[in-house]
Amino acid sequence: MSSNGDDVPVVRMEKIVKRFGTVVALDGVDLTVNQNEVLCLLGDNGAGKSTLIKILTGIYTPTSGRIAFYGAPVDIRTPAEARALGIETVYQDLALVNLMSIARNFFLGRELARAIGPVRWLDMRAMNERTRAALADVGIHIRSASEKVEKLSGGERQSIAIGRALHFGARLLILDEPTSALSVAETRKVLTYVTSAKERGLSVIFITHNMHHAMMVADRFTILRQGQLVGNYAEGEVTQDDLADLVMGQREV
């Protein structure tokens, strides 16, 4: 658990309902993320995973329900408010700018600048140095911080996005299908970064369709199906086949 010994969950979402007109995307879903754990959020397409995360990150407003962050009720209305709490999300599309350098992407929205009187300019040297050092600190080694993101592989892009979240003080890291379309070697690296994030005291929500990857990193599993909660299971309570059956609705465990 956390270094302060507190067992209060990082996030507790209770009875979350989200309607889009007559469509019920989420129907009374609960989700709890404990301190210093990896929670895998599983479900088929249309299960409600993305909707639930978009509520947690301020993109959607719930129709009803409650959210607490470290035990305190919160009303997250915008992504900026989620980030201010320490909730960082690495989406499947990564939100990286291909034509910018690694350092520019790393500090995007938080750029370092120098000034003489009224004249200000980006301090690229400082951003390059701090980017390289920050990524190395979490076990990510890059060729050059000035290299453009478009030249990076999918796994390298994931590592930059994860490293950025770690460096800027995330308390909860949400990873949306981080291993999608990656090679076996790159997938192994990304899963290592997930484990490293937990070892550094973060909590992680890991969203994936891949049951094997889920089994490799998860402490607990939360499964959604058709907008409803199927159940919560601890590591060791279910097998990989159990997870697949639960996601598909073939049987209960």
Image (spheres, rainbow, N blue to C red):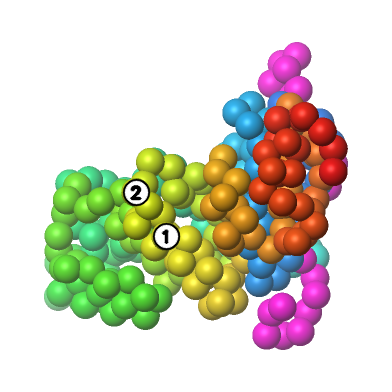
Q: Position of residue 130 (x, y in %)?
A: 27, 77
**Disc 1 target residue:** 188
**Disc 2 target residue:** 183
Confirm whether the magenta stretch covers residue 18: yes
Q: Which residues are drawn in magenta?
A: 1-24
Residue 202 as seen in the image, left or right of residue 17: left
Between disc 2 and disc 1, whose residue precedes? 2
Q: CA distance from mark 2 to mark 1?
A: 9 Å
**Residue 142 in sight in this render:** yes
Q: Foreground: 221 or 94?
A: 221
Number of numbered discs overlaid on the protein picture: 2
Q: Quadrant of residue 103?
A: bottom left
Q: In the rendered image, which quarter contains the C terminus?
A: top right
Residue drawn at (37%, 80%), measured in percent from left and top? 137
Residue 42 as seen in the image, left or right of residue 249: left
Q: Foreground: 224 or 212?
A: 212
Q: Is residue 20 above or below residue 114?
A: above
Residue 40 as seen in the image, left or right of residue 230: left
Q: Position of residue 45 (x, y in %)?
A: 60, 28
Residue drawn at (57%, 50%), measured in percent from left and top? 212
Residue drawn at (23%, 68%), measured in percent from left and top? 142
Q: Quadrant of residue 204?
A: bottom right
Q: Secondary structure at mark 2?
A: loop
Q: Quadrant of residue 244?
A: top right
Confirm whether the magenta stretch covers residue 8: yes
